[in-house]
Amino acid sequence: MEKLKRAIPKKPVKLRIKKGDLVEVISGKDKGRRGEVIQAFPKLNKVKVKGINIITRHRKERVRRGADPNDPARVIPGGRIEEEAPLYASKVMLVCPNCNRPTRVGYAYREGEAKPARRKYRVCKHPDCGKEIG
Ligand SMILES: [Zn+2]
């Protein structure tokens, strides 16, 4: 069987979502649910969202090699472990903190900032909101 290549985009797209953002899932089994981004993977174009895309891993109990036999942390417990799996950033939308709606993200400069000091800020794309997201 041919070995499958990992689905890594050739040119990483710049993520408009970062750690700590509130996002809403727009497709897949967790559609409509919201959560906080706990990790961003710009190279993979993926994000890990708290409580979203939970997978169950069956892990065996392991003993850490070379550890002190009296150390209680020596044994890594096994069993069913539930954790978040990264999902594609295109499956989630950033929730605007001002209007509380999922939005596309635009970039704009802040008024009154001159060239060397100015930077781009993320803004809400809803025409009736348009506020800075930060
Ligand atoms: Zn907004």
Image (spheres, helix red, strand yellow):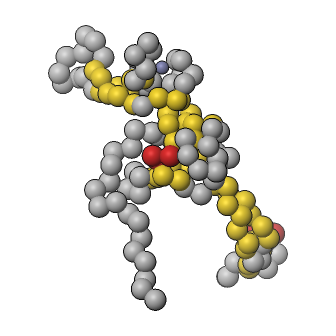
Using the rendered image of the protein, determine whether residue 84 is visible from the camera's viewpoint: yes
Report the residue at 47% width, 29% height from top: 103
Q: Residue furthest left?
A: 115
- The quadrant the C terminus occupies is top left
Report the residue at 46% width, 47% height from top: 89
User: What x and y, as percent, mark residue 94?
Assistant: 50, 33
User: What x and y, as percent, mark residue 122?
Assistant: 38, 27
Q: Which one is nearer the viewer's eye here, 55 or 113?
A: 55
37 up-or-down from 62: above or below: above
Tally the marks. 0
User: What x and y, as percent, mark residue 125?
Assistant: 40, 23
User: What x and y, as percent, mark residue 50?
Assistant: 64, 45
Report the residue at 65% width, 39% height from top: 33
108 up-or-down from 91: above or below: above
Res 113 quadrant in image: top left
Instruction: Indicate left or right for 19 with 125 as reference.
Output: right
Q: Residue furthest bottom?
A: 1
